[in-house]
Amino acid sequence: MTSKTLYIIVCGAPLASRTGDGVRAARERGWEPYVIPTYAAVPWLAAQDLGDAPVITGNRAPDQPKRIPPADAVAVVPMTFNTLNAWANGTANTYPFTTLCAALGARTPAVAVPFAKHDLAGHPAWPCVSRGTSIRGCADLGRPKRIVRIFRTDQIGNWLCSRSRI
């Protein structure tokens, strides 16, 4: 089976403690995972066995070559309130956010598992954006195709299997 490149964007929330499980599941399904954590997610990764999956942090220097191949797909697990809103608004001020915005612009298939504390989930922006309304709203830009799927944690494996035919 030919390996496909999967960017796993990891945000700082309890589900980040299972990133190693995601790396293993991706490999079992023929993906080559690259872990791209937000700054808040880095402490969650410290004690995990990620195999030899590269962990990419920070921006590269201008004279450095690209560090990873282009993604065939992107998984954002977990996707926190901050990341979801930054992605929906096109905020590209960190490497993970830039990666997400570029993936959306390149029409790279993406899946996300929203995760927010109860008080943040009560914010008026959360229901709209976590259902994919704002991200899927690319129709406003003349591109009606839905490229971001919002899933529960238990649905990601099925998505990875279906994407393995890319």
Image: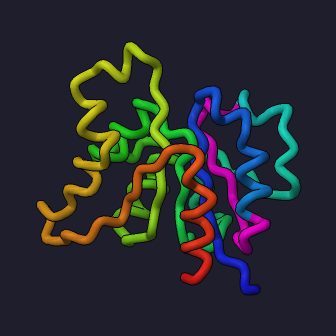
Number of marks in picture: 0
Give whichever of 82, 26 is nearer the camera.
Answer: 26
Q: Which colour scheme appears in the figure? A: rainbow
The quarter of the image holding the N terminus is: bottom right
Q: Residue furthest top?
A: 119
The quarter of the image holding the C terminus is: bottom right
Q: Is residue 66 left or right of residue 86?
A: right
Q: Is residue 66 left or right of residue 144?
A: right
Q: List x then y, in percent, for residue 65.
A: 65, 69
Is residue 158 within the magenta segment?
Answer: no
- Point out the stretch of residues depicted in magenta: 27-42
Q: Residue at x 58, y 63 (%)?
A: 158
Q: Residue at x 35, y 65 (%)?
A: 147
Q: Is residue 13 above or below residue 94?
A: above
Residue 65 seen in this snapshot: no
Which quadrant of the figure has residue 85? top left
Q: Residue at x 36, y 23 (%)?
A: 121
Residue 39 seen in this snapshot: yes
Which quadrant of the figure has residue 69? bottom right
Q: Is residue 90 left or right of residue 60?
A: left
Q: Is residue 24 above or below residue 80?
A: below
Q: Residue at x 39, y 47 (%)?
A: 92
Is residue 36 within the magenta segment?
Answer: yes
Q: Is residue 118 above or below residue 105?
A: above
Give whichever of 84, 113 is nearer the camera.
Answer: 113
Q: List x then y, in percent, for residue 114.
A: 45, 38
Q: List x then y, in percent, for residue 137.
A: 20, 56
Q: Residue furthest bottom?
A: 1
Q: Is residue 121 above or below residue 56?
A: above
Give whichever of 126, 90 is nearer the camera.
Answer: 126
